[in-house]
Amino acid sequence: MLERLELHHVGPAPELIFDFAPRLNLVTGDNGVGKTFVLDVAWWALTRTWVSHPASPHRGQGIRPAISVQFEGKRKPVSYSSSYDFQAQAWTSKGGRPANPGMVLYARVDGSFSVWDPARNYWRNAPSLGVDAPDRPAAYHFGPREVWDGLEQAGKYLCNGLIRDWASWQGRNGEPYHQLLQALEALSPSEQEPLVPGELTRISLEDVRDMPTLKAPYGQEVPVVYASAGVKRVISLAYLLVWTWQEHLQASRLLNQEVTRSIIFLIDEVEAHLHPRWQRTVLRSLLRVMSALTGTGDVQVQVLAVTHSPLLLASLEPLFDAQRDALWHLNLKNDRVVLEREVWRRRGDANSWLISDVFELGEPRSLEAEQAIHDAEALMGQERLVDFEEYERVRNGLCASLPDVDPFWLRWRFWAQEAGLEE
């Protein structure tokens, strides 16, 4: 498990220090404060590979950029620090055989996906830097299209892709297909709208692949390539989780070694493209799927998830365990990004989360309604006699922006009656 990550003079702040919880870590904050950056660095700290561009250090006299990490390795705790070599324009690596963090998965918001598998990406007889062995890739990096069509690297076919694997699994009707069915069922938005495969089909004369389909609630069987953005993201997550675990089982068998007992899952904007009904269930469903795939209670699963969704946080209130879970808030204060571990409190509905210090909205309403309520509360707080024309102006603003059933009207009418402005 990833236990600690320290960033010094790299990223959005001079210093960020995470002491991660062992099960679920939620990272929130405004756009541009470094949430995705934290996932990128966590991936690199565990796997020694970057998913895209290496992290750029701060520059200046006396500045010493560093990334420090601590995690529970396969055999013992691992702790090391990497500094930035300005002459080499690279982050230094720890010498010797690289540590084994267990399986690491990274789902990015654009549909790309990365896998580091201790059975397929770890060099038991590694060179000093652990990245030069010719027979195994440093990690599997899938672009959005490669998730669907397959991954090829240096003339080797590493993954057939969702379309071919799904069709093959369905035709054989073996364990991978049953696990896919289980994953789709768990990740469905509700029992009334299950993700159920239909019959394989062809979609054109130019595409000879057997195309998986999903049974739509309106009675049709829709080829997966025509599914909505939200459905595509969910079924690609289901496929990649099943594919990763199945390939790990096969590789572990060939190597005559035990399967991993640790899985770290990084996921960016977990609610992306999903209907609110789906946002309420997706994270708990992912945890359930990963536990079900391993089929044993002794595999630890840790999740680091970025979210902008107040509904997702509200949905986790019955499940959140302060001993095993944490809510991290990257916040902009006085033109500086600061990291806060929020004290978990049940706030109730999504609106209460929106106006909390996590999201910091003044009102869970339109900008016009927020201004109208601000004006009304300022008027209600005055100690002097209220001018009737001023009262009418504020009341008209409320009428223009609030529906008749808005609960604020109760406060307004009670005040207006007490002030003698309404009967």
Image (cartoon, helix red, strand yellow):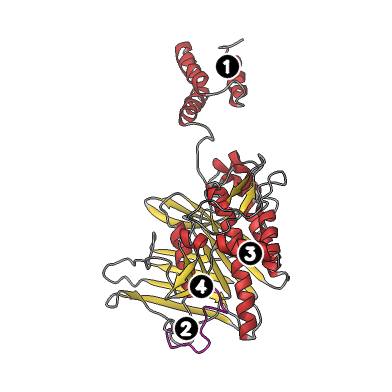
Determine if the magenta segment contains residue 122.
yes
The mark lying in front, picked from 1 and 3, is 3
Relative height, residue 69 to residue 13 (above, below): below
Name which quarter of the figure residue 275 lies in: top right
Q: Nearer the viewer, residue 237 or 68?
A: 237
Estimate how packed mark 1 is, as few (under 14), some (14 to 19) or many (20 or more) residues with alpha carbons within 10 Å.
some
- Hey, what amino acid is under mark 1? Ala
Residue bearing the label numbered 3: 23
The majority secondary structure of the magenta stretch comes to loop
Label 3 and label 4: CA atoms lie apart by 30 Å
Residue bearing the label numbered 1: 416
- Hey, what amino acid is under mark 4? Leu
Residue 303 seen from this side: no
Residue contact between numbered discs 1 and 2, judged by CB atoms under 8 Å: no
Estimate how packed mark 3 is, as few (under 14), some (14 to 19) or many (20 or more) residues with alpha carbons within 10 Å.
many
- Hey, what amino acid is under mark 3? Arg
Q: Position of residue 208 (x, y in %)?
A: 53, 58
Label 4 and label 2: CA atoms lie apart by 12 Å
Q: Nearer the viewer, residue 221 or 117?
A: 221
Label 1 and label 4: CA atoms lie apart by 71 Å
Relative height, residue 240 to residue 372 (above, below): below
Q: Position of residue 408 (x, y in %)?
A: 59, 26
Residue bearing the label numbered 2: 135
